[in-house]
Image: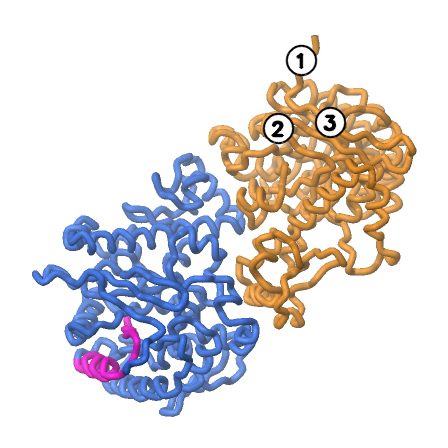
Chain colours: A orange, B blue
């Protein structure tokens, strides 16, 4: 008799048999509630989605958030959070949480790392102290934090900075670490997702997909993308993964992607779950996403603009304040600017995902995707661009 | 037939005839609603109370806020705010607003000022550009901003940095500028308060009280205090003013005072209205006010403290989060720390004022004041101290 898993995923609307899209809708059930997919997870690096409180997160429509194992391990410490009742209680967030494995931050953020088959030794970006992460420690940290979903420890590689053999070594190691992560994981109320790596090498991506998918993970992360690869390279890597996964019933999570139009393409290819710091980070820089592109609220032309950032947007910013006011707040470096702008960009992003779900359920996703009219000029600055995964490493 | 004034004040509970206190309760009616006094106004220097939005302000119990004429004149500009519908619409604050005259900031904040009988020439602290404020311009700026209450242009002097003759010159000039401010003020839906100066010189304080009270202002500000004077010096200056005002029916507003225990003493002496950046500023530095004193949340001992900052406090911080979480947010320099801490200190301060009002109405204010047990050691760091008015100049 199979044990009931703490997190289950059901495809509620399968991709159409006509092959027009692999987009699908689903429902992830967790100990802290359900998540309708495709879903986007805002990132709460330090157990807070920057500038927002839990009420704000509910208001923008967040169903589930991501928190960073690496950051919380270093500060305030996973054992401290466990003593305080776990991450949900600590940050007063009642809905689902996923933690990443820490592997990405160790590779991208920490200093002086040395990686061997046993694990990764690195220096904290906060104080230079030396630490060593192993699959077993990553799992122990995540069990202490207590998210609904933990993620196996991996070794990502930057797609363009690594040779085939470097990618091969890291990918094989990721598979061995996946098995060790599974063996170490014991918390019964927590799911464990595995991470598929393989960079941009089709053979390694395929091998990693087969290796990770063969293990009894509750979900499958697709790592090593959403970095500096092109959209075509990402699509090609994703194609390898999703084609091999075929009818695998588990959720597919593309780590680190946050540009709405990029997510739309990934949904089309069959991805269910996303996370990124991108919408919040660009908001704090004064870039507000709107249906036609974006507005840079630091531009002086908005100082006399009495219109809301986006007509009919239900967010805390747009329903009360003008572009002029937000522009003033940014110029005066007022803290309220960061909260209001973040509320808007997350509302925009989460609404974008809700529309995609509705289109999938209505069977109109291919038309919806075309209506979003991918920009003919990919260098157009009005199109939100990724490079969000690496940015994410710096702390949300 | 007397014209109905846009702002009226009614003493709803007069000071008791037994002379035990001059504390009184009142009600200030404005075009944007009523304010129960004694009242404390949070400061929204740049048309925002730092880190809070209007919903937060309502939740902490703010009845009325102060905005700074000097800052808004420089950025984003009063004419711009007027074109955008005025300060209430600009910052989406539906309740009463008072603007100060700009005199204090010109004297304390701007560079290279030259003051003559005509007005004050100064350099912007933002960009060094040269400006000249006159009573007429201060009134024009405030009429453009559109608060419920404007304040006459004045020349404050720092009590300890000025000779008798310097204070005498500034006080006489403040009287002449008060008359010019009154002559210039025409906006029918806006009240105008005058400012009593006179430093710590009893004769000058008395002369200023008589001169300003003789003019048809809607309320009387008491300026030049809440700086570096001692509590005894402040009480002595206040005694001169309030004794002379006697049964004057207009509201008395002590500018810049924000320490709860200091306000309690001033209420006892007959003050109705206060403002200060102090509760919010110390909050942003990690100092949380509690009934017994304060907690410095930057202290490592709070990192493991699962208790709320203050039991039974209804604020956004205390009803959801632990001291441990707030302490973590401060260490990680997370934006949410500043909002939560500010919500708490303003809730504490405004609740403190509400208790004072209830005690006055119940006839128990003298006992309430004694129960607050002024600290026997005035240097005890656990007692919130002022020096808030000068701090306020720097921008809230």
Q: Earlier in the sequence, mark 1 or mark 3?
A: 1
Image point (77%, 52%), residue name: A385
Image point (68%, 50%), residue name: A348
Where residue A110 appears, x then y in whole percent?
Answer: 66, 42
Is A232 positioned to the left or the right of B15 in the image? right
Q: Is residue A304 above or below residue A220?
A: below
Label 1 close to label 3 by CB (< 8 Å): no
Magenta highlight on residue B209: yes
Q: Which residues are magenta?
A: B203-225
Residue B277 in view? no
Circle 1: element type: loop
Image point (53%, 75%), residue name: B82
Image point (29%, 50%), residue name: B382
Task: Report the disc number at residue A3.
Answer: 1
User: Disc 1 to disc 2, how far (Cα)?
Assistant: 17 Å
Residue A254 lies in quadrant? top right
Magenta highlight on residue A240: no
Task: Report the disc number at residue A219.
Answer: 3
Which residue is identified by label 2?
Answer: A148
Q: Nearer the viewer, residue A174 or B25?
A: B25
């Amino acid at each position: 008799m199979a044990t009931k898993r703490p997190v289950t995923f059901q495809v509620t609307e399968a991709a159409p048999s006509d092959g027009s899209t692999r987009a699908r809708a689903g429902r992830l059930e967790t100990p802290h509630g359900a998540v309708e997919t495709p879903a986007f997870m805002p990132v709460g690096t330090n157990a807070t989605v920057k500038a927002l409180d839990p009420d704000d997160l509910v208001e923008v429509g967040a169903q589930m958030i991501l928190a960073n194992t690496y950051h919380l391990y270093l500060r305030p410490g996973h054992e401290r959070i466990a003593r305080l009742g776990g991450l949900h209680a600590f940050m007063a967030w009642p809905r689902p949480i996923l933690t990443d494995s820490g592997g990405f931050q160790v590779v991208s953020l920490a200093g002086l790392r040395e990686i061997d088959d046993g694990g990764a030794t690195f220096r904290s970006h906060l104080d230079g102290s030396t630490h060593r992460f192993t699959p077993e420690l990553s799992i122990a940290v995540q069990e202490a934090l207590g998210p609904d979903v933990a993620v196996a420890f991996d070794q990502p590689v930057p797609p363009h900075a690594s040779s085939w053999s470097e990618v091969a070594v890291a990918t094989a190691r990721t598979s061995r670490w996946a098995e060790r992560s599974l063996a170490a994981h014991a918390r019964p109320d927590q799911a464990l997702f595995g991470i598929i790596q393989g960079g941009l090498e089709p053979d390694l991506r395929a091998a990693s997909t087969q290796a990770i998918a063969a293990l009894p993970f509750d979900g499958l992360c697709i790592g090593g993308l959403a970095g500096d690869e092109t959209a075509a390279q990402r699509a090609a890597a994703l194609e390898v993964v999703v084609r091999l996964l075929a009818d695998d019933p588990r959720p597919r999570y593309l780590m680190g992607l946050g540009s709405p139009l990029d997510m739309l393409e990934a949904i089309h290819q069959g991805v269910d779950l996303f996370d990124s710091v991108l919408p919040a980070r660009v908001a704090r820089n004064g870039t507000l996403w709107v249906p036609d592109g974006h507005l840079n609220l630091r531009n002086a032309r908005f100082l006399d603009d009495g219109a809301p950032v986006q007509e009919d947007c239900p967010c805390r910013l747009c329903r009360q304040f003008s572009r002029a006011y937000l522009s003033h707040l940014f110029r005066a470096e007022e803290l309220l600017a960061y909260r209001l702008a973040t509320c808007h960009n997350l509302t925009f992003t989460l609404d974008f995902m809700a529309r995609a779900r509705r289109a999938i359920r209505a069977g109109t996703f291919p038309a919806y995707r075309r209506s979003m009219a991918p920009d003919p000029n990919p260098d157009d600055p009005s199109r939100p661009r990724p490079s969000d995964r690496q940015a994410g490493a710096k702390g949300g």
